Image: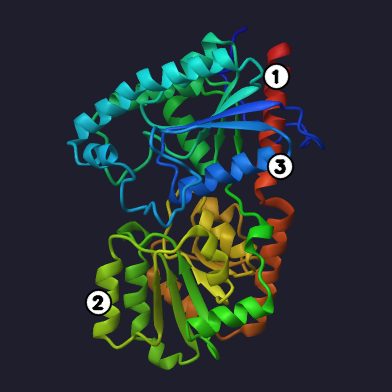
Amino acid sequence: MTSPAAAGIHVAMNENTPPAPETVPVRRVLYHHRTQGKAVEGVHIRGIADALRAEGVAVDIMSLPGADPYASPKSMSPTRQARWWMRLLSRCPEPLFELAEVAYNLIAGARILAYLLRNRDVDFIYERYSLFMFAPVLAARWRKLPIILEVNDSATVFRVRPLFFQRLAMAIERWVFRRAAGLVFVSGVFRDRALAAHGAIAPTIVTPNAANIADFSFTAEQRATAREKWKLDGHVVCGYLGAFVPWHAIDDFVRRIAAQLGSAPHLKLLLVGDGATFSALNTYIQEHGLEQRVVLTGRVAHDAVPGLLAAMDMAILPNAGDYTSPVKLFEFMACAVPPVAPDFEPIKEVVREGETGWMFKAGDLDAAVQAVLERSRDDAGLKRVGAAARAYVAAERQWRNNILQLVGFHLALKKRECT
């Protein structure tokens, strides 16, 4: 049968996918990824796998050798490679690094084929797409098994580490995007960008990230304990959760708001995480005598995050990718912590202005500072918007919602294949 992509047709299935099934008629899924499975990557992998397992689906995760998405994020820093050979590869010149990624297809292909020969009851392969990766699609086609790619990265987007073999990456990406059974994008703008770059691609759905309400619930006692521990009592607390890296701009935000903290004695900042800009920001805070106004926790395990979120009254996302779906946004909202975030399209897809959060013009950190200062003076508004944000996540953006949409997508693809 000719695929939609081969016929030069792109099908967006968000509106056409059947309603999520009440039960999940799937026996086994192979989840393949080539990431280190830590930090945000690990959160996403665990979220999908655990939600499927909760519905009775057997999920086998095939990871990069030496990677484990269930290992503690505290012991696997997002700023440090997990294994010696990963550290070695990360220091290679870009051409050698990318050639190693291409060569990994030999390993991935052999492992997946061996797995499929042992397991005949697999309903479909779910892969977190990686650049230069084509072997899983080849293996799935050889076994006549559907493969759905979750697209979080692409040769079409800006990269901190620019591609050397750009044309090769684009060619491989175009091939797999057209020959996969389906594609799951984290935002509509990301899907549209891939479609514009590649023309015909497989059927798609858009599925933003998520957070489980049960994992982000706390009692009044837990909140009081957290605020006492970090000396936050009597203050409105604006929090940040994530990596301290230049493109997240938390260091720039702190430097811009520092001069105005004197006129906002009610406000404290609670910043959770670590990364490349952490040390310099810590030095800046100490040099300017801001230790009592800006609290740095450093790196924490992911299971410690809800307790820290419990201490917050609002949250700031100074910057984000213009095509990404920040997991931390949903974690804030799940914990009833209303976010102040840049107005990138993926964020506008999930945040309703003044109802479940607030947005400022992306790239304008002065506007972000003013938004935080203004909202911090409205205690009732913070509670109202926080409660609405939590209700939205509970109803629409838990990991179970995502896997039900995924299963519905899989069933729709099977139905198309049979017609």
Return the disc, 3 or 1, that comes first in the chain's sequence: 3
* Label 1, label 2: how far apart the Cα atoms are: 57 Å
Look at the numbered discs 1 and 2 and tell me whether their residues touch, using CB distance below 8 Å: no
Secondary element type, mark 1: helix
* Residue 82 horizontal/vertical position (percent): 34, 45
* Residue 286 horizontal/vertical position (percent): 27, 83
Question: Is 176 drawn above or below residue 305 in the view shown?
Answer: above
* Residue 300 horizontal/vertical position (percent): 44, 64
What amino acid is at disc 2?
Answer: Thr
Horizontally, residue 288 falls left or right of residue 400, namely left
Horizontally, residue 144 falls left or right of residue 200, namely right
Viewer can see residue 345: yes
Asked which quadrant contains residue 49, the reply is top right
Residue depicted at 26% across the width and 41% down the height: 84
Residue 275 is labelled as: none
Look at the numbered discs 3 and 2 and tell me whether their residues touch, using CB distance below 8 Å: no
Secondary element type, mark 2: helix
Residue 54 is labelled as: 3
Q: In what quadrant of the picture does the C terminus appear?
A: top right
Question: Is 90 drawn above or below residue 377 in the view shown?
Answer: above
Q: Residues within 10 Å of mark 2 (few under 14, many from 20)?
A: few
* Residue 390 horizontal/vertical position (percent): 68, 64
Return the disc, 3 or 2, that comes first in the chain's sequence: 3
Residue depicted at 25% across the width and 41% down the height: 90
Circle 1 residue: 414
Look at the numbered discs 3 and 1 and tell me whether their residues touch, using CB distance below 8 Å: no
Secondary element type, mark 3: helix
Question: Is 104 drawn above or below residue 269 in the view shown?
Answer: above
Circle 2 residue: 283
* Label 3, label 2: how far apart the Cα atoms are: 45 Å
Q: Residues within 10 Å of mark 3 (few under 14, many from 20)?
A: few
Mark 3 or mark 2, which is nearer to you? 3
